[in-house]
Image (cartoon, rainbow, N blue to C red):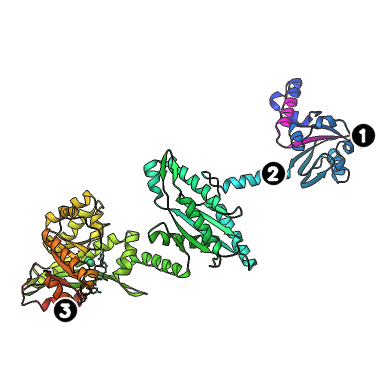
């Protein structure tokens, strides 16, 4: 290293200006430090009086960048030290920098001689008159650094496979290619592990992470090198397949994926089985953007999950339309409730023993949608259940039904004991404000609790825990009664049923419909009625449409009926008219 101290640098150190010797020594040290620690290579050239350029210094970074010991070239004329430079503009530039205090910067400088070859970025400046420093860095090295950095920001840190950003970028490129080439095929496979949360919850996050790492490895091994495997959510993976000859290939890949995932995962000595719901979107299902393509595959995956997990579903346009209409319905629901678009119909429930009595009504929700017209609960209740909005709809229905029965009871004394049956969503009960809201509605609408019956489906009841049961008992103590709805469609345990405060059991209409078909069905219904009687519950048959069904059920001992044979669900006005036809008869509960 034969670098000389630049005089200007000394003058910029006021703290040491009193002592020229110390000053000069201190600056020299700093100057050497600078040269030594610079990550950029530095060469120094001196312009001699005869016009020759002599190589007078280099730093350690220069040795590293050029993979050589520069010191053995010190003192040599430029042409000898770096023969590759003679054919370039560099010598002329260096001379100008040394003589005129000019600066020369170039981003791409190609150098090649016997020993060295590379592409460099150069920055040359005058250190002192006659002395030029040339700083340089390897562009190819920088490129490697840049790609390494890019890779880091596009990589999932846990599994080492691509992350969402990289996945979207690759899909974007695939879409571009698909536009240019007719023979280009690609497909997106969206893989979501079923109930992965359970693994995290029961075995801990470390175990969960180990499973994810192994899943990534198995996915990688199930597809070709050129396919992209990415982790884009906690337990969501995406495989982008490209350049295959037939759309059979993604199907085969999915088979391999499922096969490889079917092998149990061993984590901390425990064997864990993992299943996945898989969505497939083929490149032929045109998507405008990478996000859209990914969303299509995600939709298909959700469809697979909704159908009961551990399945494969393909994206279709009709699935997209369906989903959009569900999303729209969900968005419209709040507005619908606020603007009074929902209303109730009332279907009579009759008690038919020796006399024909009006037992009460079941309140059934309807939605008059401003654009779509009338929407039935079979369509909007499942959507409301998914979004949790069924809770608000439930309280709305209860308030409205209670209000209307109170009004009727005031007008028609024979409705003193009439029951209003209101459907209760299983999502309502576990909420902390359940009991207060129920009490508040009864108080506001002035409906006696004895006139209210809540219908809860069998499946919901079977899934309820002890705190839910306790709340139902509390309502029962207030005078509210309960029906098991859709009985026969779930898997009731008798022991469980006896723990619940139930008064009525509604035989699901699917059984009623089958009554005439075969003897077995009749025996099932007979058993249900016997069961109910032994539990001291009354049986309501719903969906009774003809006299034959009515007769068979009466023969089996059923007394309560609901169905088109007697009446369809009625508007408020028509239900009131129906009430009037029972004026002369007694009402029984
Ligand atoms: P569900 O509680 O089992 O209600 C009985 C359904 O059977 C009603 O349909 C009723 O109109 C229908 N039905 C009655 N008799 C007959 C018949 O003779 N033949 C046939 N084919 N059908 C008959 P709807 O009104 O469409 O209600 C469907 C479901 O929507 C109800 O099933 C209930 O689970 C739910 N739902 C309705 N209103 C509400 C509500 O306010 N809250 C909640 N959570 N669910 C509701
Ligand atoms: Ca019901
Ligand atoms: Ca029912």
Write the residue at 42% across / 52% down: 275
Q: Earlier in the sequence, mark 1 or mark 2?
A: 1
Q: Is residue 563 magenta?
A: no
Q: Give the CA distance from mark 2 to mark 3.
A: 87 Å
Question: Is 425 on the left or on the right of 271, as rendered?
Answer: left
Magenta part of the chain: 26-53
Foreground residue among 483 and 425: 483
Mark 2 sits on what residue? 142
Furthest residue toward right = 50
Expressed as whole percent of the image width and height from the top left, the position of residue 214 reads 49, 45
Write the residue at 43% across / 59% down: 311
Q: Give the CA distance from mark 1 to mark 2.
A: 37 Å
Decide if residue 398 is in sight here.
Answer: no
Q: Earlier in the sequence, mark 2 or mark 3?
A: 2
Mark 3 sits on what residue? 547
Foreground residue among 152 and 460: 460
């Amino acid at each position: 290293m034969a670098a000389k101290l630049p005089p200007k640098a000394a003058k910029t150190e006021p703290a040491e200006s009193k002592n020229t010797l110390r000053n000069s020594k201190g600056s020299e040290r700093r100057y050497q430090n600078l040269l030594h620690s610079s990550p950029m290579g530095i060469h120094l050239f001196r312009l001699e009086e005869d016009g020759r350029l002599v190589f007078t210094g280099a730093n350690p970074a220069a040795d590293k960048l050029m993979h050589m010991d520069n010191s053995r070239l010190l003192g040599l004329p430029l042409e000898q030290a770096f023969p590759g430079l003679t054919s370039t503009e560099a010598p002329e530039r260096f001379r100008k920098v040394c003589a005129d205090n000019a600066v020369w910067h170039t981003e791409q400088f190609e150098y090649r001689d016997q020993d060295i070859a590379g592409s460099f970025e150069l920055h040359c400046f005058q250190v002192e008159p006659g002395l030029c420093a040339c700083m340089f860095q390897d562009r190819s090295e920088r490129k490697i650094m840049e790609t390494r950095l890019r890779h880091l920001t596009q990589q999932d840190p846990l599994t080492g496979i691509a992350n969402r950003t990289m996945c979207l970028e690759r899909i974007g490129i695939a879409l571009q290619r698909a536009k240019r080439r007719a023979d280009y095929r690609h497909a997106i496979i969206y893989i979501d592990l079923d109930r992965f949360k359970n693994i995290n919850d029961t075995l801990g996050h470390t175990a969960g992470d180990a499973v994810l790492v192994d899943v990534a490895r198995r996915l990688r091994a199930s597809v070709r090198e050129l396919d992209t495997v990415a982790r884009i959510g906690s337990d969501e993976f995406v495989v982008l397949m490209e350049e295959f000859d037939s759309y059979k290939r993604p199907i085969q890949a999915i088979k391999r994926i499922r096969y490889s995932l079917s092998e149990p995962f061993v984590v901390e000595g425990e064997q864990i089985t993992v299943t996945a719901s898989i969505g497939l979107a083929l490149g032929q299902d045109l998507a405008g953007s990478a996000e859209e393509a990914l969303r299509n595959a995600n939709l298909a995956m959700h469809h697979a999950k909704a159908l009961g997990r551990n399945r494969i579903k393909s994206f279709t346009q009709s699935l997209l339309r369906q989903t959009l209409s569900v999303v729209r319905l969900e968005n419209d629901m709040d507005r619908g409730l606020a603007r009074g678009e929902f209303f109730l119909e009332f279907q009579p429930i009759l008690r038919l023993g020796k006399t024909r009595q009006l037992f009460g009504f079941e309140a059934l929700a309807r939605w008059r949608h401003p654009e779509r017209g009338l929407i039935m609960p079979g369509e909007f209740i499942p959507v409301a259940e998914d979004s949790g909005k069924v809770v608000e709809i439930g309280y709305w229905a209860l308030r409205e039904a209670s209000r209307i029965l109170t009004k009727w009871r005031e007008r028609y004394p024979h409705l003193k004991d009439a029951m209003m049956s209101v459907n209760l969503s299983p999502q309502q009960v576990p909420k902390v404000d359940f009991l207060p809201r129920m009490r508040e509605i009864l108080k506001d609408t002035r409906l006696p609790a004895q006139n209210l019956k809540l219908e809860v489906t069998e499946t919901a009841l079977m899934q309820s825990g002890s705190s839910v049961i306790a709340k139902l008992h509390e309502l029962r103590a207030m005078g509210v009664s309960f029906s098991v709805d859709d009985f026969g469609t779930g898997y009731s345990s008798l022991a469980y049923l006896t723990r619940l405060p139930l008064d009525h059991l509604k035989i699901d209409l699917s059984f009623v419909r089958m009554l005439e078909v075969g003897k077995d069905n009749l025996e099932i219904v007979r058993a249900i009625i016997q069961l109910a009687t032994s539990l001291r519950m009354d049986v309501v048959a719903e969906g009774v449409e003809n006299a034959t069904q009515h007769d068979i059920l009466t023969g089996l001992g059923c007394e309560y009926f609901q169905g088109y044979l007697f009446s369809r669900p009625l508007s408020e006005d028509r239900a009131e008219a129906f009430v009037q036809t029972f004026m002369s008869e007694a009402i029984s509960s």
